[in-house]
Amino acid sequence: MGVEVGAQAARSRALAVLRIRSRALAVALLPAAVAVVLLVGGSTGHITGGSWPVTRWIVTVLAALVLLAAAGIALVVARARPAVSPTVPIAEASAPDLYRLVRDLADRLDVPPPSAIALTPDCDSWLEDRTHPAHGPPPPEHRDEIAGVRGVGGGAGRPRRAPAAPVLVIGSPFLWWMRVGELRAVLAPVVAGTGPSAHPDIAAARRFVRGLDAAVAVTSEPARGPLARTVLAGVGWVTRLLLRSCRGHAAEMERGVAAAAAERAQAVDYGLRIVAQEQVGLAYAGWDRLLTRVALPAWRMGRWPARLDAGVVAALTELSRRDRLAEGFASRLGERPACDLLEEPGSVDEAASLLAARLFHGGPAEPGPDWAPVDWQEYPDEVVDRTWRTEAARLHRVLDALGVRHPTDPTQPDQGGPTLARVLDHLTAPATPATDDADLSVDRREAYGERGTGVSLDETETETGTGTGTEGQVEAESQAEEEVGEDGEPVLGSERTAALAAGLSAELAREEAAAPAVASGPGGGAEQPGPDWSFWDDGMLPLFPLQPPRSGRELLADHVTAMVCCAAMDTAGAAPGLDWLDGPALLVDGVRAADLGPRVLTLVEDGDPEPLRDWLRHLGVRPEKPVRLV
């Protein structure tokens, strides 16, 4: 295992875990040992007379019960399937260069190579033990009638499972954003962990801890009978006690393994590894932004982007174009990317994208009519346009349910169509005598200015306007702090606005409840890599939700923004677009607009439509015209 200090500390902690296992075994065997002593003493005549016969039978029965309980607990621990991270397995035939890179790295580190490679839709890499029989392939079928006879065919009929090295799990965004040398430097400390993992004491301690953790999960499963719940409650209490006893030693053991791996990997590309760690943080930021701003709107519409990893490269390239601090990152794109180590990077990217949609959103396991892949070229029409028109249609359905009338304008032939004017009139707060409309109009023009026009769906969170004076900004900030409700959300403009927000929340909840249940099954085709669907339970999807449910204020702001964008597209010639960092965007003459978010918030929170009306007039949008909805 090496002479690293961390390796020695890890082995000592592993021995501590194994001592806890030995003590538990000793406690289970202690009543049996006492019973054997009493039985032998009675049979030889050394322990006879008085109450010894009764004591002998009581201890014997107790020993039998304890042994039976210990055997049951051991059976549950042995048969429980440890948790396995959902990944996309990569066969050696589909990535020979990647396997060659990892093996060469293991040779340089003088450690055993990983047994296999898998990808995960996350910005992380680790080693995962999959030596449990439930995680391996099924045993081969013996078609020879005498294959199972002892001494024939080279061994017994039941082959023994050879110890296997852990599986190397690599974050899929790393392969697309990092260069080959950077990936090698990042994987060096991870691959170096196979050395300590091969030590018998550490491997046995890890199997014991993983078995206890899996047994706790088994005893926590619902939908069992009263007797089974009672038995499993006792098993769960014992396994939790053992797990708490060895938790500290197991954590220190893993820290020692990590320290030993990092110490051994220092000799491999140390300088490049420092630079590569910067790329890890950048890739994580781009991946998180892509999932929350770009992929999530598509998932909500029943579409999943099939090239998420390629989208990371586009997002980070866009970041390097906007941010002068990131200019150096764009020059790296001329080097060979790590995804070239794959034979078919497109199919691997598609499988990882489908797994990401399943993990972070809970989508189906297989593509279908209501869960279809979408290319980035089709994203504006298939996702952005449909999202805006669907939300605008939902907004008008709720207005119809609330009995909101259409504006009466004798000059318009269509008085019953879905118009933006209907929304503006409903959300406009009634004027009060203390309000000076003229002064407020001037203040709004000064606060929002008359420069560029545009929108992104997430500007309601990121942009606050273009104030021209520090006094006005301080006053606006103090006023915003005062107008916050008890739940932490800003107070809406009026009771009508609050009722509309509540209606949207209820309507969206009804639509989600009426959606068909997520189907589980094997993902991907037979000719391309697919996720390991059989290794984990589908009942807790999504495993990692990206965002909490939207509040009523956020829903209302998003739906009003969608209605404004629909009106701009239908009456002013605007078009839907994709911003790699902010998601859906409105394009005016091919340029992304940029001021709609704060104006929509002013309408929603204050009931003041004038800033938004100024924006519409400047763009040439006609709010009285009906729009096309889904």
Image: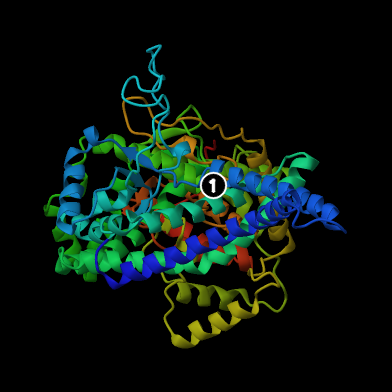
Residue at point 51% right, 64% down? Answer: 599
Quarter assignment of residue 221: top right
User: Residue 318: where, in percent of width, then height?
Assistant: 26, 57
Amino acid under disc 1 = Pro
Q: Name the residue at the right extreme.
A: 50
Neighbour class for label 1 at 10 Å: few (<14), some, many (≥20)? some
Q: SS for tag 1?
A: loop
Asked whether, in this view, residue 75 is left or right of residue 197, the answer is: right
How many badges with numbers are in the image? 1
The spot of residue 187 in percent (x, y) is 25, 57
Give percent across and percent down for residue 62: 76, 51
Residue at the disc numbered 1: 542
Establish if 523 lies above or below 163: above
In this picture the colour scheme is rainbow
Of 17 and 627, which appears nearest the observer?
A: 17
Q: Dividing the picture into quarters, in which one does residue 406 lie?
A: top right
Q: Is residue 508 visible?
A: no
Q: Position of residue 424 (x, y in %)?
A: 61, 56
Up-down relation of residue 468 to residue 591 (above or below): below
Quadrant of the image containing the N terminus: bottom left
- Residue lying furthest bottom in this view? 471
Using residue 156 as the reference point, say whether residue 29 is left or right of it. right
Identify the residue shown where x is 65% and y is 61%.
428
Q: Can you say whether 504 is above or below 202 in the image?
A: above
Report whether residue 208 is seen: yes
Please tell me whether residue 78 is drawn above or below residue 240 in the rendered image. above
Q: Residue at x 33, y 56 (%)?
A: 199
Q: Nearer the viewer, residue 537 or 159?
A: 159
Q: Quadrant of the C terminus?
A: top right
- Farthest top residue in view: 145
Q: Nearer the viewer, residue 316 or 31?
A: 31
